[in-house]
Amino acid sequence: MSDDAPAFYNTWSGVMGNVKHQLLCSWHSLKKRNLFPKHCVSYVHQTSVQDFQNHLSKFIEDLMSDDDTKAFGIYFEKYYARRTKLWAYCFRFMLGINTNMYLESFHKILKHIYSEERKVKRLDKTINALMKICRDSVISV
C-alpha cells in the first residue's frame, strides 16, 4: 500500500519484485473530504462492488453539479474514478485490508512530531526521523 506517487510502487517492485495487488492509501482519495457532499462520504466504505459503483456514479454527479466542488470532481474523475481497484474497499475486502488507520496514524506521527510538520525532501532526513521513531518505540517498551 502506498500513496499515489509511482516512485514508491516502482521502487518496491524493483527491489522486491512484482506484487499481485497494488493498493493506494485511501486517505489520498479522501484528503479533500471537506469538499464532498455529506451523503457521499460513505461511498468509499462500501464492500459490495455494485453498491460502490452506484455510489461512485452519484458521487461524481454531485461533485460536477456544484460549482464549489466541480474542479475537484474533474480531478477525481481523471485520476481516481478510472482506477477504483487500487483504492476502493470493495476491491480490497477479500485481501483482508479494509482500513489503513495504523498507516495513517504512523504517517501523522512521522509528519507532525518527528518531521516537525515540514515536507522532508531529503531521504537522509526521512531515514533519520524513522530511526528516531524506532529508537523511541524500543525505549518505551
Image: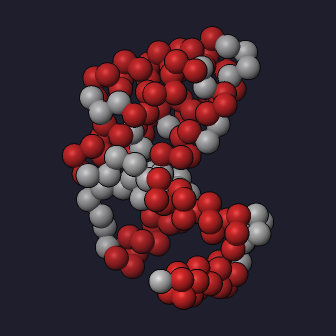
Residue 11 at what x, y percent from top left?
47, 72
Q: In this view, does 121 lie to the left or right of 59?
A: right
Q: Which of 99 and 19 is in front in this view?
A: 99
Considering only vertical position in the picture, is 111 above or below 83?
A: below
Q: Is residue 125 left or right of residue 7?
A: right
- The N terminus - image quarter: bottom left
Q: Can residue 127 be seen in this view?
A: no
Give the residue drawn at x 57%, y 14%. Answer: 62
Considering only vertical position in the picture, is 88 above or below 137?
A: above
* Residue 116, image quadrant: bottom right
Q: Which of 133 and 37 is in front in this view?
A: 133
Give the residue drawn at x 28%, y 29%. Answer: 49
Q: Nearer the viewer, residue 58 or 128?
A: 128
Looking at this view, name the residue that lies furthest to the left: 94
Considering only vertical position in the picture, is 2 above or below 120?
A: above
* Residue 5, image quadrant: bottom right
Q: Is residue 49 visible?
A: yes
Give the residue drawn at x 32%, y 22%. Answer: 51
Give the residue drawn at x 39%, y 53%. Answer: 23
Residue 92 at what x, y percent from top left?
30, 46
* Residue 139, image quadrant: bottom right
Residue 32 at what x, y percent from top left?
64, 37
